[in-house]
Image (cartoon, rainbow, N blue to C red):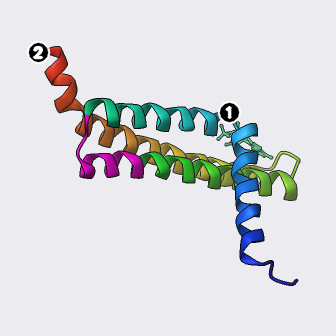
Amino acid sequence: MKKPPFHKSVQFTIRGILWILRNERNFQIHILGLIINLFLIVYLGLSNFESALIILVSFFVLVTEALNTCVEKICDYIQPEFDTRIGIIKDLAGGAVLLATIAAIVVGILVYWPYFKLFVY
Ligand SMILES: Nc1ncnc2c1ncn2[C@@H]1O[C@H](COP(=O)(O)OP(=O)(O)OP(=O)(O)O)[C@@H](O)[C@H]1O
């Protein structure tokens, strides 16, 4: 197959992101998480390093969610019927999202805790 020009490839990837934005509820929830984090970064005046950490883990979750959706779509395509092997493949992909989410929560607590402490005390 002929390789598409660069601008076409970019268009295809944007089409993929728009598709997942419209169709995947979990991805939409993670996007909401990213927006809340961006708001907190500005509102609390986080340092460049703290902001980079928060943005990095937020995108880490989004990337794993997108890859999880890819795995689910491939699985549903190759085996629409119940199959324990498909089940474990999907569980593994879902597990990757959970691991990324745990990492994001831990980083979030470590970065935000000193700021929230100032509000509480
Ligand atoms: N064809 C199948 N055969 C066996 N088990 C399956 C199959 N499809 C789904 N499952 C089981 O159901 C779970 C949920 O799969 P499903 O495709 O419904 O994902 P989902 O609910 O959209 O998940 P997510 O919330 O991660 O997007 C899988 O992790 C797996 O354990």
Answer yes or no: disc 2 within 8 Å of ligand 1. Answer: no
Amino acid marked by disc 2: Tyr
Identified at 49% across, 35% down, the residue is 35
Residue 25, numbered circle: 1
Q: Quadrant of residue 47?
A: top left
Identified at 31% across, 43% down, the residue is 107
Q: Secondary structure at mark 1?
A: helix
Residue 37, numbered circle: none
Residue 108 position (above or below residue 75): above
Measured as percent of width and height from the top left, residue 63 is found at: 56, 53
Q: Residue furthest bottom?
A: 2
Measured as percent of width and height from the top left, residue 56 is found at: 40, 52
Which stretch did the figure color magenta? 45-56
Identified at 77% across, 78% down, the residue is 5
Q: Secondary structure at mark 2?
A: loop
Residue 98 belongs to magenta span: no
Residue 47 belongs to magenta span: yes
Tell me the mark number nearer the camera, choosing from 1 and 2: 2
Answer yes or no: disc 1 within 8 Å of ligand 1. Answer: yes
Residue 60 position (above or below residue 108): below
Residue 18 position (above or below residue 114): below
Q: Residue furthest left?
A: 121
Measured as percent of width and height from the top left, residue 89 is found at: 67, 55
